[in-house]
């Protein structure tokens, strides 16, 4: 017959709030609890995120990997202005870069907000800022307003720094600002297969013309021509993103260009957007100056993306396409700056 002292060998487990499924074991070797005592009450009040974590959440919500689409057009337009006029105002360059970057970031936040409110974003989406409650919807709205305001302040500074007429500056700037909002807000061009056209114009000719015009003080057709390679490269970022999200977008009831043309034509269009700029660079290099061959150094990365797209492995492909866009843009700008005087057309 067992002794009554065997009760001393009983293990007592108490669930603590420091983690799901974590238990503390009080064995026979542990100090006994005083008679009538109880475990201390757990503080279930959620801790407020630190300011560092909050700032990091705001930065991630901006999708900074996509900023090459706005920074390279500004650099290109400024480089064209430098080659045309022989001078470059660094303050105008910085103000125009911040203005375009602020509008781009605000547009990304508008996209995040409306995609979430329409039920398009989900747990498997690339942007889970609101899905995972990293930020609250009102936080995204406030941050977007701050960025649009910052962009307008920079545009106002450009009015005093640049010789460009106010009506011309307002036309270009507010045209870009409106496009960044209407891409998903208001009309929602993205949802009716017009988003590609909006991005092609806004982050190509419009941004390059804006950066060029505020430097030289007048409007010109030249930056529109030089913007074509960067416009195609930037559109490749969006198209890769829409091709990846084709099924989820179709289930959500929205229509994109990738959905309309299907997987095969989407692959062909992606190749056209990625590789046609190299055709332009080859023509410029052979007919005008060899410095325009610098962007050809990025062709290995382009072929790597083509193989990944062809295999329909879309993991990280928008980010990789943005990386290609950045390198192509930088080498393009360097090629223009290194070109001998009066060798490039209209410069």
Image: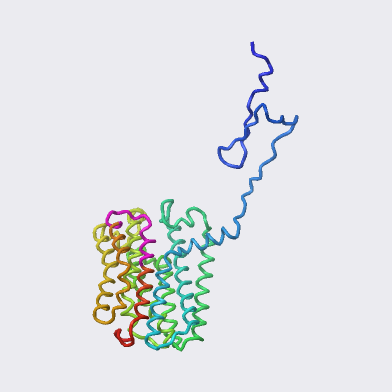
Q: Quadrant of the N terminus?
A: top right
Q: Nearer the viewer, residue 82 or 115?
A: 82
Q: Is residue 35 left or right of residue 78?
A: right
Report x, y in % for residue 102.
48, 71
Q: Write down the quadrant of residue 179 in the picture.
A: bottom left
- Identity of the residue drawn at 51% across and 64% down: 141
The image quadrant of residue 222 is bottom left
Residue 315 part of the magenta-drawn span = yes
Q: Nearer the viewer, residue 178 or 299?
A: 299
Q: Which residue range is magenta in the image? A: 308-324
Q: Is residue 76 left or right of residue 138?
A: left
Q: Quadrant of the C terminus?
A: bottom left
Nearest the viewer among 315 and 108 is 315
* Residue 312, quarter of picture: bottom left
Q: Main secondary structure of the magenta part?
A: helix
Residue 38 drawn in magenta: no
Residue 76 image position (x, y, % from top left): 38, 77
């Amino acid at each position: 017959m067992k002794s009554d002292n065997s009760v001393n060998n009983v293990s007592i487990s108490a669930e603590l709030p420091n983690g799901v499924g974590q238990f503390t074991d009080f064995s026979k070797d542990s100090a006994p609890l005083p008679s009538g005592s109880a475990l201390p009450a757990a503080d279930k009040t959620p801790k407020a995120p630190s300011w560092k974590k909050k700032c990091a959440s705001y930065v991630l919500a901006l999708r900074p990997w996509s900023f090459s689409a706005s920074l390279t057009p500004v650099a290109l337009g400024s480089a064209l202005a430098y080659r045309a006029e022989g001078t470059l105002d660094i303050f105008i360059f910085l103000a125009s870069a911040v203005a375009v970057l602020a509008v781009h970031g605000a547009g990304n936040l508008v996209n995040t907000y409306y995609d979430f409110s329409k039920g398009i974003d989900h747990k498997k989406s690339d942007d889970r800022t609101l899905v995972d409650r990293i930020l609250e919807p009102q936080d995204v709205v406030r941050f977007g307003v701050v960025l649009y305001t910052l962009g307008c302040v920079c545009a106002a500074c450009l009015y005093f720094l640049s010789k460009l007429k106010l009506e011309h500056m307002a036309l270009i700037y507010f045209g870009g600002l409106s496009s960044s909002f209407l891409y998903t807000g208001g009309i929602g061009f993205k949802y009716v297969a017009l988003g590609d056209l909006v991005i092609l114009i806004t982050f190509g000719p419009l941004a390059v013309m804006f950066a060029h015009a505020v430097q030289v003080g007048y409007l010109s057709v030249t930056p529109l021509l030089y913007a074509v390679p960067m416009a195609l490269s930037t559109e490749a970022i969006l198209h890769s993103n829409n091709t990846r999200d084709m099924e989820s977008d179709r289930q959500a009831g929205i229509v994109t260009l990738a959905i309309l043309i299907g997987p095969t034509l989407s692959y062909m269009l992606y190749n056209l957007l990625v590789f046609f700029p190299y055709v332009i660079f080859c023509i410029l290099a052979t007919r005008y100056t060899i410095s325009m061959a610098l962007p050809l150094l990025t062709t290995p990365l382009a072929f790597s993306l083509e193989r990944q797209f062809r295999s329909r492995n879309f993991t990280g492909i928008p980010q990789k396409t943005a990386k290609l866009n950045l390198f192509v843009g930088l080498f393009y700008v360097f090629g223009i700056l290194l070109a001998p005087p009066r060798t490039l057309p209209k410069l």
